Image: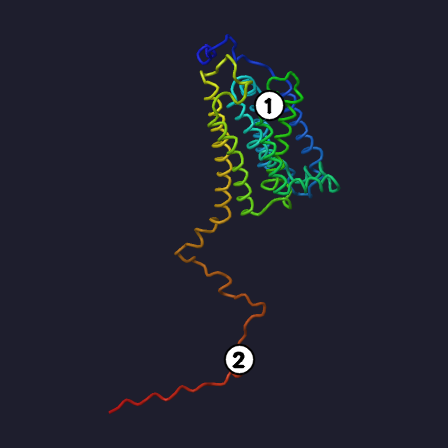
Amino acid sequence: MLAQAVTSGSGVDPFAFQAHPDVWLLVAALTGAYVYMVKAVGPHAVIAGQPVVTRRNVVAFGAAMAMLWVASDWPIHDLGEGYLYSVHMFQHMMLTFFLPPLALLATPEWLLRALIGKDRLYGVLRWLCKPVVAGLLFNLAIVITHIPGVVNASVTSDSAALHYGLHLMAVSASLLMWMPVCGPFRELQMGTGGKMIYLFLQSVLPTIPAGWLTFAEGSVYDAYDGPTRVWNLSVTDDQQLAGAVMKLGGSMFLWTIIVVLWFKRFASSYQDEHQYRRGRLMPTAEIVGHDEDPLTYDDVEREFARVPATTEPDRAQPDR
């Protein structure tokens, strides 16, 4: 009934359930590998007394796996790959903007160091995570995944290699892009101001294909110009909605992070600095000062003896 209410054209039901065991196996394999590393490797990789993972790591990992599952399974995957490019765009937003930072926040430093090591592979990762390199690779991946010929081939091709290869390329480039922002390696992260500028620049280039989709006339991606129209959306409406998702969704997400970083960096002490009430206790610095050697009575007496005394000039007598 739902499919008939929202679909027109052919008799194909775009909402028919389709199983994706490959997605289930991928999520299960990643979960099993994470649990193994935490339980078997983690206790030997951290200092005694330190937690192997934090609560934030565990919550972020659960959110990342849920994001991967929702984005890659029915119905988003099936609608996005066969009927609506706007859903396809939303799927890519989940895989490139939302999933990678969650995956990085879920990864403790010791785990990534155990996987990467300290030799050549670490050097390659360090170079790829330079902000300029990572930003260029990320935007290049975005451009490639929006080329009409590439999109049409990935959707219509019977081979899964191209489809999954493009997803792997986009997610990998996105992981590198997010490393200078929230990666496990502190030495690869930028300062707060640098992160704000960096994320703002990442929100600029996607506006070009988003604007192109919004104002394009006719079908840009022929693979989505089929007889089955979900929710009665025309090809043009679908493309415009995809442009809005890309422009507004990605930009709002990045700008929200920028605002959070701004408040964290520049407004954290605003209340204390603009407080009119004085604390009940005198600060320790005002009691003992900042000198390494304490000031004694003999020091004061010595300074008075060194400086010659000055006599006040005679005050003029008032005229009588």
Q: Position of residue 98 (x, y in %)?
A: 55, 32
Above or below, 265 relative to 92: below
In the depicted view, which residue is nearer to us: 219 or 114? 219
Tell me the element at label 1: helix
In the depicted view, which residue is nearer to us: 88 or 109? 88
Task: Write the residue at 28% across / 89% down.
Answer: 318
In the depicted view, which residue is nearer to us: 161 or 314? 161
Q: Residue furthest right?
A: 119
Disc 1 marks a residue whose amino acid type is Gly
Residue 42 position by quadrant: top right
Residue 63 position by quadrant: top right
Q: Nearer the viewer, mark 2 or mark 1?
A: 1
| Residue at mark 2 to residue at mark 1: CA–CA distance | 86 Å
Disc 2 marks a residue whose amino acid type is Glu
Q: Residue furthest left?
A: 320
Tell me the element at label 2: helix
Crowd around label 2: few <14 · some 14–19 · many ≥20 (10 Å) = few
Task: Write the residue at 63% across / 26% down.
Answer: 166
Task: Write the residue at 47% across / 23% down.
Answer: 217
Q: Residue furthest front?
A: 217
**Disc sitting over residue 245 in the figure:** none
In the rendered image, the quadrant that contains the C terminus is bottom left
Above or below, 5 relative to 35: above
Which of the two discs, 2 and 1, labels the residue nearer the N terminus?
Answer: 1
Q: Which residue is mark 1?
A: 149
Q: Position of residue 255 (x, y in %)?
A: 49, 39
Q: Position of residue 150 (x, y in %)?
A: 61, 24
**Disc sitting over residue 303 in the figure:** 2
